[in-house]
Amino acid sequence: MARSYGVHAVEVTAIQAGTATINFRVVDDAGCRWFAKVYRGELERERAAIELAEFARQGGVPVPEVRRTLDGELIDERAPMSLWEFVDGETAEGGISGARWSAVGAVLGRLHRRLAKHPAAAPTLRAAVGVRDVGQAWQSFDRIIEGYGNRATLTRFEQWAWEAAKERRGLLDRAAAILAGLPELTVQVVHGDLASPNLMLCGDQVAAVIDFQPPAPRFAAWEIARIGCDPRTVMLGDEWISGLAELLIAYREEHPAARVDDLVSTVAAGCAYTLASTYPLAEPLDDPVAVTPTLEVYGRARHDAALRMLERLEEVRDRLS
């Protein structure tokens, strides 16, 4: 850090968060705090993600400022690492409630309004069936079900994942019908991974949006659902139904050009996407090291939230229309 950034660290503390990076809280000799990310993946992708974060920050989105190296680079490739201002707050993993709904909606609307101007792709309309390839999902679920069925013994989580996979496979026709019944939806550059771990809150305000993905066009309704219908929030109770309406009102105030079809279709798109997703049901088969107690809790919540959204889908549609 001293060589590449001119920052002299006097305290370095590992932060137990993140999967693609190793993260640290750093205090320098002037008392300033920094957030250091050490990369394990492809640096070109990471650089593109940082550039997207900078683009969003320049549009007024609360994104931590990245500190460039003494040579003006976003990433010190010798480490390899990036260095950011440290933001106080907590992630939204405890769920969204109360006044936070409007605060999150306003920041999300500002984010999408800004990213709609990104040169990588202009907003366009596409058939909603593109939200999730349900045909491919059939094969994925069949593989998982067969994989667990071929094992002599299963852990408790593996047994649960096997049963959940069979239940979700039986709902794929409904997921396909939900998407087929939606109007064309907006596809544009989005954050790419806007789940609750990547949204920092301080009180009732959004402190920061973090961990962008490289710029790529995705369905805006899908991204709204990722945070507005996050499993951790849906499983808190029924407040998510009225809270999501507040989020969408605040979103539209910040992003007046947003199409009503996208907003009304948020829960349907999120429900169908989650029903047809194998994550993290497949992790014990594909990436056993990634299966932690935290992931197991999240997996169960994600499954239950998908079923809850499906059960309440018509009610929520009426509430949002």
Image (tube, rainbow, N blue to C red):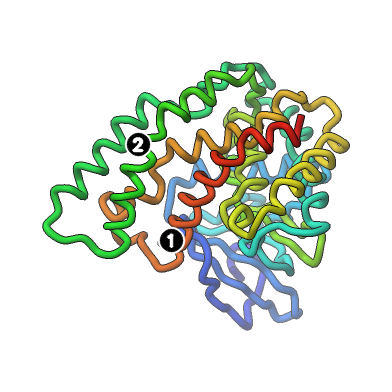
Secondary structure at badge 1 equals helix
Residue designated by label 2: 169
Q: Quadrant of the C terminus?
A: top right
Left or right of residue 319, residue 213 in this image: left
Secondary structure at badge 2 equals helix
Q: Which of marks 2 and 1 is in front?
A: 2
* Residue occupying the point 68% across, 21% down: 122
Q: Is residue 60 above or below residue 68?
A: above
Of residues 164 and 80, the one nearer the viewer is 164
Identify which amino acid the numbered label 1 is placed on: Leu
Residue designated by label 1: 295
Left or right of residue 201, residue 95 in this image: left
Q: Position of residue 16 (x, y in %)?
A: 51, 71
- The CA distance from mark 2 to mark 1 is 21 Å
Q: Is residue 124 visible?
A: yes
Q: Is residue 78 visible?
A: no
User: Considering only order in the chain, which callout, 1 or 2, is on the residue closer to the N terminus?
Assistant: 2
